[in-house]
Image (spheres, helix red, strand yellow):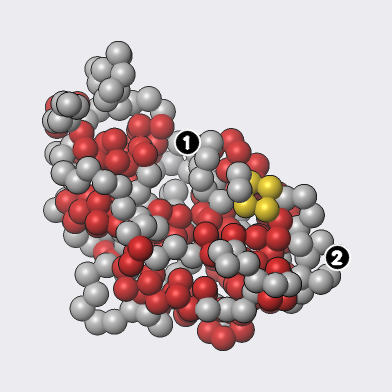
Amino acid sequence: MKAALDALYDAFNVPDSAVDPVQIVRRYPRPDDREVVAFLAAGLAFGRVGSVMASAEAACLALGSSPAAYVRGFDPAMPGGQFGRFVHRWTRGVDLAGVVWTLRRLLEAAGSLEQAFVEGLTPGDRDVGAALEAFSARARGIDLGPVYGRTPERPGAHYFFSRPSTGSACKRLNLFLRWMARRDRVDPGGWTRLPPRLLVVPLDTHTIRVGRCLRLTRRATAGWRMAAEITEALRAYDPDDPVRYDFALCHLSMMGGCGFGTRRGSAQCPLRAYCRPRKRR
């Protein structure tokens, strides 16, 4: 199957092979701007792709031509500091302001988001799970009073900082890490201290579908364990960069290549020779 996966990767390893918010991230040549834009774009990557693209564009427009400088000088009380009428699904402008405020405090303490994240890495880590846990816990510990006034019990900004310990697959954070730690014609990179071998697939509906068809996972429940299991299976094909197949597998399903559970079947799927989906009860 490695030859088929590599061929699929090559087919999708083109800058505009599919509509994806990473296209917005690639516009920023400076690593400090790119990591800020990547974090927000990945954090908004839930819902229909058209809506995700529109919301990411709106957030970037508010940040201006120098997103990192905007975040470092961000004050929730300044004009536009609550991001006006911004809405993306259940995320409101004040929630986005809470995320930007959190990023400002992380940048003040660590100098970059890369540094804030890699501080949680330890020798011998099998994946980014422990570092993600530490990063999100640190972010959630930041006082959001300047943004919300009286901080709600469950501030919307915390939705951007999920944790493996809760069972979450941390899809959007893993997507952010993929964009920043990998570099090819799709992922722009920018970080140098997070080895791609530690990345975990950004688990979503499409990755789950293909993962089950290819028997990359036998788990029934989506979450961190399923994401880690699919990643572990992909390490057999590329131990140094298992997540390089993620973009192709995800968009193969999004574009209708995987016909599992549909009337058309998998006649058009380039991986159909290796497809062994379990029958649903």
- Going by the numbered disc 1, the residue's amino acid type is Ala
How far apart marks 1 and 2 lie (CA) works out to 36 Å
| Number of residues whose C-alpha sits closer than 10 Å to that of mark 1, classed few (under 14), some (14–19) or many (20 or more) | some
Q: Kindly identify which residue carries mark 2.
A: 79
Mark 1 or mark 2, which is nearer to you?
2
At x 52%, y 74%, the residue is: 139
Q: Of residues 65 and 263, which is closer to you in this image?
A: 263
At x 79%, y 54%, the residue is: 84
In this image, 281 relative to 132: left or right? Answer: left
* Residue 135 in sight: yes
SS assignment at label 1:
loop
Q: Of residues 25 and 276, which is closer to you in this image?
A: 276
Relative image position of residue 237 (x, y in whole percent): 17, 50
* Residue 9 in sight: no
In the image, residue 28 sits, relative to residue 76, either above or below, namely above
Residue 168 position by quadrant: bottom left
At x 68%, y 53%, the residue is: 92
